[in-house]
Amino acid sequence: MNNSGTEERPWGVGIRAVGRYLPEKNLSNSDLEEILLTRDDWIRANIGVENRRMAAEGEWTSDLGTAALLDACDRAGIIPADVDLIVCGTYTPDNMTPPTAMLVIRKAGASGATGFDINSGACPGGVFALDVGAKYIATGQFRRVAVVMADVSTRTMDWKDPGPAVIFGDGAACYLLERCTPGRGIGTTLLRSDPSGYESVWVAREKRHRRDGTPMSSGFGDNFGALDGKAVHAFAVGRVPGFIKELLDTAGRTADDIDLFALHQANLYILQGIMRELGVPMDRTVINIQKYGNTSGASVPLVLREAEDLGRLSPGDQVLLTAFGSGFSMGAALVRWCGPEDFAPVAVAS
Amino acid sequence: MSTVQSDTLQVLKEILDEVAEVPADQVTLESSFVDDLELDSLSIVSVFVLVQRRFGVEVPNEVFDRLSTVGRAVAYLEHGAIPE
């Protein structure tokens, strides 16, 4: 799928603000050594994660998402009631239905907002859900859209399987989207899926038991996060760089034109592999996996926010967002970063 | 094989069963952790975490990466050196 973005439209779709929320509780590799048969030095050498956050007991996806939305609104100088559509990207909804977006609307006080969830496979959501939200701005149907990416991945674990536990962390982020100056904002976007890797990184519905026969359950009952690290690595380093080059070709750009690569934080060595394949030095990306682990769909916007806070994003910069993972799916979007002057006052539908 | 070696092999078999549910009768000194016992890297580190706890011997990453078979692991635990 190809969305060339801004053609024949008197407005662009800009990222007005990026909000974030990370739970207070920190889980270091040393903490994991107490729970699992794993080692800090091995995790650092093979995954690149040193710490990750974990939602508190009773803290759910909607709580993380609400906090990220409030943060985005605060940065934009608006209130949640000024948002007219909330798209929540999650694979760990508070309940199977209604959508988690409903609770975000209620908890944030985004009265009047329409809302729904998108499950685009956890990690790819950082671009897939963004693309959905962007299309509502592009069509003119909504004027201010919050794309809330939130997951409590640690709740999918059985805490006997070190595979997912050493990689994932909980977190949330929120893209606040508005009309912007034409030619700025979200441009060429590519989405692609390949179900041959369906079982490579997934939440499997299955009965699990301890060695003594006692049934195990995750925070989602008989649903457990599971992954085949080798298969994910092969997919990510083997396929994502070519996909990024395809996007750049489509947009008439090269990797040299990109000021910042905002990549999904899957694994430090996957990130290094992708950048190496692209022939781009690591100083043109921002890495935060060592602090937060893989935060699923929140990962790409968390990188953007970190880049912004570090002064690594300026109006006019060409930014390449890439999210990939479960499915397998991958999405990439080229964004011309906006400044405050690119956004006109917005009157949202009441 | 000495009695000590047999004990070491026996404990390794118990660890392999505990970590990866590998039946003891499938484990020989010639068994490769990856090719024969089908352990992934996460399971291998789990094995050596338990080895450290049971034997009191720390096996660094760079060492266990070279202990490709059960026999090499037994020899290392017995003699403290990576077999040639």
Image (cartoon, coloured by chain):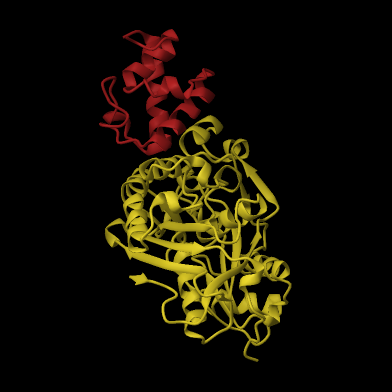
Q: Name above or below for residue A61 compared with residue B72.
A: below
Q: Residue drawn at (49%, 41%), measured in percent from left and top?
A: A282
Identity of the residue drawn at 38% across and 38% down:
B20
| Quadrant where the image shows the C terminus of chain A | bottom right
Quadrant for the N terminus of chain A in the image: bottom left
Left or right: where A347 falls relative to B57: right
In the image, which lettered chain appears yellow?
A
Q: Work out whether residue A296 or residue A37 is closer to the camera in this orientation and state it.
A: A296
Q: Colour of chain B?
A: red
Residue A288 seen by the camera? yes
Q: Position of residue A73 (x, y in %)?
A: 69, 71
Residue B52, image x, y percentages: 51, 23
Asked if residue A218 can be seen in this view, the reply is: no
Q: Which residue corresponds to the image point at 30% horizontal and 32% vertical from the top-left? A: B34
In the rendered image, which quarter is residue B28 located in? top left
Relative to A46, residue A170 above or below:
below
Question: Which residue is drawn at the image coordinates 62% and 90% (left, top)?
Answer: A349
Query: Is residue A211 placed above or below A141 in the rendered structure?
Result: above
- In this view of the protein, which residue sits in the foreground, B52 or A121? A121
In the rendered image, residue A235, in percent from the top left (x then y), is placed at 33, 50
Total labels: the figure holds: 0
- Which residue is nearer to you in this view: B59 or A323? A323
Q: Where does the image place residue A216, in percent across and percent down from the top left?
A: 49, 54
Q: Quarter of the image holding residue A205? A: bottom left
